[in-house]
Image (tube, rainbow, N blue to C red):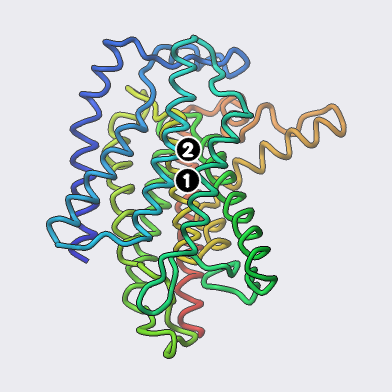
Amino acid sequence: MIAVLLSGAFALAISLLATPLFIRYLVRKQYGQFIRQDGPTAHFVKRGTPTMGGVVIIAATLIAWAAASLVTRNVPSASALLLLFLMVGLGFIGFLDDYIKISRQRSLGLSARWKFIGQGVVGVTFAVLAVNFPSENFRTPASMHVSFIRDTKIDLAAMGATLGLVLFVIWANFLIAAWSNAVNLTDGLDGLATGASLIVFGAYVLVGVWQFNQRCSSLASAGPSCYEVRDPLELAMVAAAITGACFGFLWWNASPAKIFMGDTGALALGGALAGLSILSRTEVLAAIIGGLFVLVVLSDVIQIGFFKMTGKRVFKMAPLHHHFELSGWGEVTIVIRFWIIAGLFVAGGVGMFYAEWVAS
């Protein structure tokens, strides 16, 4: 538990102190945000605001996790390393996307094709490695069962070793693509995605600690109330580091933002959330805990689908936060109310997680 607290505290301090230094560097290099022309006109004043702040979030997470592990003499686990690999890998793709936008002064970065290929390479590598590295109890970081609050009876491995692995890779990459794009779509207002992320990852700190305290000592003793997650405490450490990094970054990202996280941060956070859901065996529960991100994606899907079918729009603009912006809501009002919604979803998800354990 001390390792979890240290991980979060170190990340908060690093992010809070390093972000202004990074802002000065970006200003000196003139690495500013390019604003899309079809967006809300109120956003034009944000043109030139330093972006790629996700670099600080990723760096603070890595350094804090490593420092906490060193101080507590905690041996890095396969689950933690895989989760960090996924976060850094997608963050690097986002960094390339941001850099192309800045260097070419346009709102589009990497083409959809290359972004898809990059995410695929990272996602496939993560998925294949996640079903290897069994512990002394023969548990691998991920399971080929589709999970809700814990593994369900849907076992992809039952379809054969090769086909099961292929299906798991497809399922894992669907989750990775869905969550990374969900956080990316939510990152449209100052502090919105950062604040929502720290609430969601904070919930996963609680989930990881609880799973560690209620873990199964061996496969033979696995019962309805214990959890077969391979490395729950290490996952909680990484989640705490991400939460702390988001807390520190939010100080500078809150309205009026001095820096944006960019695709670097959005893809990294989305990838980390997907990885946590897979490694903690809470793949479906994550859609409740991260319900705000799901709502934002659904608003975009509904807008596009309804427009293609009828030629009319459901919202004034998608994603959802831009609809309220064009309806006259202030940016800070939207952000705070969306944080409240994110908190309600998290409360519901964590409550469901605990209720399942009590019921079992």
Please, what secondary structure does the residue beneath circle 1 have? helix
Of 143 and 51, nearer the camera is 143
- Residue 266 lies, with reference to residue 158, above or below; the image says above
Residue at the extreme bottom: 221
Q: Give the camera-side residue of 140 and 208.
A: 140
Q: Which mark is residue 211?
A: none
In this picture, is 179 found above or below 263?
below
Q: Are marks 2 and 1 in contact (CB under 8 Å)?
A: yes
Rate crowding at label 1 as few (under 14), some (14 to 19) or many (20 or more) other CA atoms within 10 Å: many
Identified by mark 2, the residue type is Leu
Q: Which residue is outermost to the front?
A: 162
Look at the picture and state if 65 lies above or below 337: below
Left or right of residue 73, residue 169 in this image: right
Q: Nearer the viewer, residue 339 or 272?
A: 272
Taking the spot 46% from the left edge, 79% from the top edge, the residue there is 357
The image shows residue 70 at horizontal and vertical percentages of 15, 55
Q: Which mark is residue 271?
A: 1
Q: Position of residue 201 (x, y in %)?
A: 39, 52
